[in-house]
Every structure is written in structure tokens, then in C-alpha cells.
Amino acid sequence: MSLAASTTAGAGDSPARRPVVPFDTAPRRGGGALDWLISIASPSAVLRRAIRLGKRGHAAAALPLLRRAANAGLGEAAYRLARCYLEGVGAPASRSEGTRWLQQAAEAEHVPAQALLATICLHGVVRPEDTASPDAAQTANRLTANRLFAGERAAPPDVAAAAHWAQRAAEAGSPDGQAVYAYLLTNGPAATRDLEAAHDWYQRAAASGNPQGHLGYAMSLAARAADDTARREVAEHLRHAAAAELPTANYLLGALTEQGVGVAADAEQAFALYRRAAERGHRTAQFRLGLALLDGSAGTTDPVEGESWLRRAALAGDAEASARLGDLYARTGTLPPNHAEAALWYRRAADLGHKPAARALASLLLTGTGIPRDTAEALRRLRAAAAGEVTAAPNGELRPRDLAALVTGAAGGAEGQARLAQWFEEAGAAGDLVAAFNYGMCLVRGLGVDRDEQQAAQWLRRAADGIPDAQYAYARMLAEGRGVTADFAEARLWLDRAATAGLAEAQAGLAEMLLNGRGGPRDPEAARALFEKAAIAGHTGAMFALGALHAGGHGLPPDLAQAQRWWQQAADRGHGYARVMLARGHVKRGCRPTKILH
């Protein structure tokens, strides 16, 4: 991007054309008549007067004098004028106008302007159409108006221009220019990188006391440090940079202090440094501080503040912080489980390429825990986590919670099933309740592992503390005596928890136990209410059971019309026994509902 811009003065800027202002009517603030007398003197006098006005707090009065001196070719005046616009001192802040005057100062061999212009180029200057105007006053007015609605439009970094101006400033002895030039030699395009030259420029900048020079030299030296003497030197340069409150320096010095590398180990001081960096927006420091506050390694435990720092790091784009937030809300721990929140953070981390988060999100999608069940997205996330190793797709329509069908169709055969089961086991052992449920189902069905109902019951019991699907699955094992001693009363309790959470299968199963008095007293009316909830949710077994209840003989008044309606609904959805009952006319005689929990 070209940074060239017109420096033509606007109408009224020429001293010869300026109208004479009587002394007694001239503005008093900032000098008035004195400014007019100086304005017809030398540009240097005009600049000196502008500087004095600025020091006295009359920046607005100094601005036209700076512009006059800058138009006369004084680089220092153009530089000061650029700073006024860049910082919004005495004029509306305008990056474009500031860049235009900075360009003029740099071309006049003003070294600080060259260094600052290099930095602006590196971060992206405004677009050319915002910098080329023959009338500076009109440009400023137009930009001010534009900014009210859309703001100035940033352009991509101009690395070539940044390197050009940084090199000129560095060779002229500017520590700022040396630090920027060294940075470009380290991190610029591969064809222009020169780590040895960068090391030397960083060293020169550091020798002049430049904070960025200290930081860059410490990082360059760290890559070469082979003994304790060199590590102590790294820490010393970081200390100088941290004193200038450079966030990266505070973070790195904190890491050295925590580990005792180059400095004495001091956990309290380390986390104080992390906090200073975190408060200034360093996302890795925010992540590290958040973890420390959660696990107590910072000297104190504060789950709420720890979560807040992790959240700030995640929102700044840290994938690991997003994944840890997902773990924090998905697993039992210092904060109560919140699977909807967990899914949000897992998705953010997965979108940034975090594979464990992608698998965790897939696990939530399989069970519909916290988010709607979505088999298709679960498969896509699993494939992404497997880096292309999972290739097969499921055939036909699957029940999202049917892990057997899902894994058989999507995990790439026995090897893929084993990998998935292993991940479920590891994540479940680490506290992920959804993964614990899925591993329990793998054990129930023999997917990727040997079938083992006793272990399956243990994993499902662990997951049942927070997962309704696990509560239902564990209740079935208790009711059927699979992997555990049969216990109808305990099964009924777990079904009640899952039914309260809204799981239709659990509502139907609990209703059947209430109706038949298994695990506790009979309660036909409560059973009917639960069957209706499950039927409204689409559970065909509950629809059939309602038909049987209304047909009579179960402690409730018969209602043959309702029986007919519910059996018809069940039959329309493919319930074979409901079709048989309708065909045989059992709606007139009544019947006992088939057990729902089977």
C-alpha cells in the first residue's frame, strides 16, 4: 500500500493571503495577535510557538501553527501534527490524517516519525482513499463525519513499507526502529527473515533501554541459552521489559519465576506477574491465571474468578481455554454441571481445531445432553477429531442415542470403535459424565471393548449423577438385574430422576412401574399422567399403554373413545401390538398394557 499523500495547503493557509486581524478583536486564548505576528516569521519560530502553546495546554491553538510549519517542510512539525491527530489532542482523532502527516515527516528524514510509521504500517494503515485529500481541514471534517457512522477502514498490514521505514529508523539510531526492524527480521516473510541480524538489532535496542528491545532480545537469547548464566541474562532482560508493563514480558517472567529458571522460584510472585499480564489482555496469562485460581496453585482458590479469566482467554481466541471451560461445565467439580454451557465452549474450541473438544462436543450431540441431538454433526465432529481416519457413514436413519448403530456405521470398523471407546474411557475417568455414559454403553454392547455388563453398570452409575440418559440406562440394568443385583425400588428412584428431567423413555418406564406396583405402591393416576407426557413427546409405547388404561380394568374409569384414539395414534406410528388390538376389537373388552420397561 502506498502511503503517499498530498501536502498541499488549504485555502487560507498562506500567510500572505491571511486577513489582518486588529489587535483588539483578535482571539485572546493561546496568544491571538502574537500568533499572527509569529506566523509571518520563520517556520522554526512558528514551530517553537506551537510547542509552547502545547505545553501550556492550548493544543487547539497550536494545531494551525503546526500545520503551517509542516507545510513549510519542517519534519518535526509534521511529526507533532501527526501525533495530534493520532492521539486526538487538539483535533478529532484521525488515523488517516495522522498517517498522512507522519508520512511527510518520515520523508523529511525525521527518525522518530520513521519508527512510528513502521509500527503503523505493521499494524495496518487506513485505506488510501482516506489519506489523499488536497485540503487537510476538509479531510479531517470528512473523516470525523465518517467515523460517526462507520469508522475508519483499516487495511491489511504493509510489511514491505514497515520494513523500509524501520530499517531507515534503525540505521539512524532509533531504538524503537531497531526493535521493530528486529521483529520484522524475526517474524516477517520467510524470504526476508534473518535471525542473526535480528538478534543484533534487538541487542542494540536493549542497550539503549528500549523495553521492546529487552523483550525481543530476551526471547532471541532464550533460544540460545545453554547454561544458567545465559538464563539469568534472559530473566534480567525480561525484568526490564516487564517494568515497562509489556504484557508478554510479564507473562514470560512469570513462567520463569514459577519454574525457577534464571530466577528463584516463587509461586506467589509468578502469579502476580501472570495477573499483571492478564489484566493487560495477554490471553495465555489469562488462561494460566484462570487455571491457577481453579486448582489453588495461585495460593488461593476462587472458582468464580478462575472461570472468568478462562472465559476472557477463550473469547480472545484461545482454543485450550475454550476446551477447559467446556470441561469445567461438563464435569462434576467446583462448579455445578451445565451441559448447554459446556457445548457452547466445546464448539468454540472445536471450531479452532481442538480435537479433544470436538470429541467432547460429539459426545454431547450423541446423547442430546444440553443441546439437541444431532447425529450428523456428531459424525462430522468425530471425523474431524480423527483427522480423516473415520470415513464410513451410517446407513439409514439412526436414533441419536443408539451408540451401537452410530459407532458401527461411523467409526471405521473395529479399530475405529476401539479408538472411540478408549477416548470415552479416558474422558470419563477424568470426570466427563457424558463420556462415562458413552463408555458404559460401549461396555453394554461390546463396541471397541469386550462386553462387560458389570463394568458397564459401574460407569453408568457414575454418569447417572448428571446425565438423564445414564439414569434411565442404569435403572433398566437395576430392573433387569444385569451387571448388578436386581433392585426395583432403586430402579424406580433413578427413573424418577430421569423422568423429571423430561426423558420420555424414563417417563414411560416409571409409569409402568407405578401402574404395576413394582418397586413401590401402585398409583394408576400418576402412571396415566406420566404416560401422557411421554405420549405427547412421541413415545409410541406410552400411546399404546394409554389405550390399555382407558380400555378399563386398571383402577381408572373406562373411556373407550380415548382408548381408540391412543391405540390409533400408536398404530399409525408403527406400533404392531396396537394394530393387533384394534383389529381384534379389544378396545371393547379392555386389556393389560404390555410392560414398557423391557
Image (cartoon, helix red, strand yellow):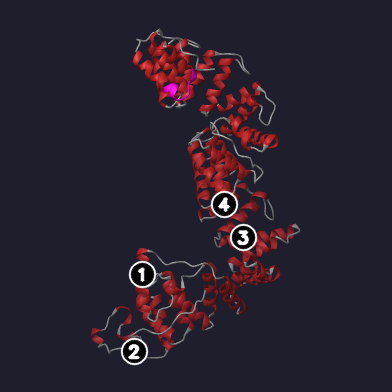
Magenta residues, as a range? Answer: 569-576
Q: Is residue 165 visible?
A: yes
Identity, as a three-letter code, of the amino acid under mark 2: Leu
Q: Quarter of the image holding residue 511?
A: top left
Left or right, residue 406 beside residue 502 = right
Q: Tell me where residue 181 appears, x and y as whole percent.
A: 61, 71
The secondary element bearing badge 4 is classed as helix
Please state which of residues 527 and 428 is positioned toward the viewer in this rendering.
527
* SS assignment at label 3: helix
Q: Measured from the top left, where is residue 229 in percent x and y?
A: 74, 60
Q: Are marks 2 and 4 in contact (CB under 8 Å)?
A: no
- What secondary structure is the magenta-colored segment mainly? helix
Whichever of labels 3 and 1 marks the residue nearer the N terminus, that label is 1
Determine the CA span between mark 1 and mark 4. 37 Å
Report the amino acid beneath label 3: Arg
Mark 2 and mark 4 lie on one chain; the one further toward the N terminus is 2
Q: Specify the amino acid type for callout 1.
A: Thr
Q: Which residue is mark 1?
A: 144
Inter-mark Cα distance, 2 to 4: 56 Å
Q: Is the residue 299 above or below the residue 428 in the image?
A: below
Q: Which residue is mark 3?
A: 239
User: Which residue is tagged 2?
Assistant: 37
Using the image, determine if residue 256 lies above or below residue 3.
above
Which residue is disc 4 drawn over?
Answer: 285
* Cα separation between marks 2 and 1: 31 Å
The residue mark sitting in front, 2 or 1, is 1
- With respect to residue 385, does 560 lie above or below? above
Mark 2–mark 1 CB contact (< 8 Å)? no
- Give the class, few, some or many, for how many residues have Cα within 10 Å of label 2's Cα (few <14, many ≥20): few
- Mark 3 residue crowding within 10 angstroms, few (<14) / some (14–19) / many (20+): many
| Amino acid type, residue under disc 4 in the picture | Ala
Q: Quadrant of residue 14?
A: bottom left
